[in-house]
């Protein structure tokens, strides 16, 4: 996702309502600062989970959080932290037992 500019509201943003702050114009539409940050954090989490060898990110996140996860961008910072911690723990366990990851 590429930010192509900024503008000042009011803007209708992602079904969330009108915002009266600086909005970011991206190739995916207009986003608030919070939405843009959540998308960037989700992208980083996807990259990190892939690097750790976890294949199904949504299934893994759902298992860790105990609820179905459809979008990593909808997670709170605390939930993303819990998923990262569980991923590193799983990798550590698999390395110590020489067991392949099955996620």
Image (spheres, rainbow, N blue to C red):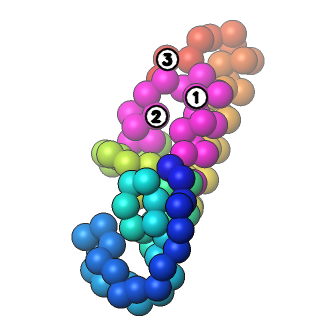
- Sequence-first disc among 2 and 3: 2
Give the class, few, some or many, for how many residues have Cα within 10 Å of label 3's Cα (few <14, many ≥20): few
Q: Residue at x 54, y 60 (%)?
A: 3
Q: Which residues are magenta?
A: 41-63
- Sequence-first disc among 1 and 3: 1
Magenta-span inclusion, residue 50: yes
**Residue 50: percent from left, percent from top:** 58, 28
Q: Are marks 2 and 1 in contact (CB under 8 Å)?
A: yes
Q: Residue at x 65, y 19 (%)?
A: 94
Magenta-span inclusion, residue 33: no
Query: Which of the 4 quarters of the picture holds residue 93?
Result: top right
**Residue 100: percent from left, percent from top:** 59, 11
Say if residue 42 shows up in the picture.
Answer: no
Q: Residue at x 46, y 85 (%)?
A: 8
Q: Is residue 74 left or right of residue 87?
A: left
Residue at mark 2 = 57
Determine whether 58 is above or below 31 in the image. above
């Amino acid at each position: 996702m590429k930010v192509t500019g900024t503008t000042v509201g009011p803007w209708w943003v992602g079904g969330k309502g009108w915002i009266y702050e600086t909005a970011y114009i991206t190739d995916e539409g207009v986003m608030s600062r919070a939405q843009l940050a959540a998308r960037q954090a989700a992208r980083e989490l996807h990259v990190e989970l892939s690097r750790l060898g976890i294949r199904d990110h949504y299934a893994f996140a759902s298992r860790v959080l105990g609820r179905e996860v459809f979008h990593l961008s909808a997670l709170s910072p605390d939930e993303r932290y819990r998923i990262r911690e569980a991923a590193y723990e799983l990798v550590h366990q698999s390395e110590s037992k020489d067991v392949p990851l099955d996620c």
